[in-house]
Amino acid sequence: MATNDDDLAELAETILRIGREIEPRGSHVPGIVSLTGTEITTLRWIQRHPRTTPSAIAEGTALRRSNLSVALRGLESHGLVVRRHDDADSRLVRIELTDLAHETSAKIREYLAQRMLSALGGSREDLGAAKRFVERIDEGLRVKSSHGFGD
């Protein structure tokens, strides 16, 4: 592997390590029910895409439908989401967040921000550039995954 490829592989491994380290678990975030990583991922997706469908969630999160079904049932049992039939097409089911879900999401985001700020020693230097860089990677991966790896 060329040096640049080594750097890219190291960057990917670092991102994975950071993700594992800061991933919020219910027991680590005061005031929320214990949620699985899949439930948190699903909750985040629904928050960014209100009144979404299970198919859109599965596609957007790259979750298998069976795993998504389990996550949605868990979120429903915690009172975080509700399923509603679409007003225009009653065959279509929309997933909506409850008020409790919005409160939970805010607590998770606060937890993430504090973890990041602590890891950075309280410094926000280069935050904007780092955020744009990681978002570019995220977007590029989403485009690639929708077309297949290596296209």
Image (cartoon, grey):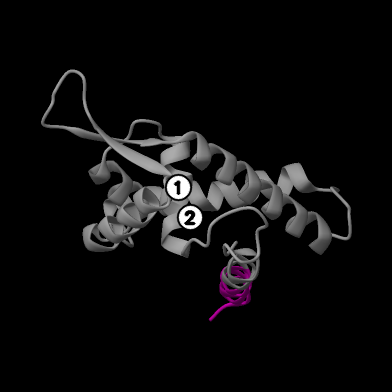
For badge 2, the amino acid type reads Ile
Tell me if I can see residue 145 in this picture: no
Residue 33 locus on image (x, y percent): 53, 57
Q: Is residue 3 magenta?
A: yes
Q: Is residue 58 left or right of residue 125?
A: left
Q: Is residue 51 above or below residue 110?
A: above
Q: Is residue 111 left or right of residue 23?
A: right
Q: Is residue 147 magenta?
A: no
Residue 100 disc label: none
Residue 43 disc label: 1
**Label 1 residue SS:** helix
Q: Is residue 146 left or right of residue 1?
A: left
In this picture, which residue range is highlighted in magenta? 1-14
Q: Residue at x 26, y 61 (%)?
A: 64
Q: Is residue 95 above or below residue 89?
A: below
Kindly identify which residue carries mark 2: 40
Q: Residue furthest left?
A: 91
Evaluate if marks 1 and 2 touch, with contact meaning CB atoms under 8 Å apart.
Answer: yes
* Residue toward you, 63 or 139: 63
Residue 77 locus on image (x, y percent): 36, 53
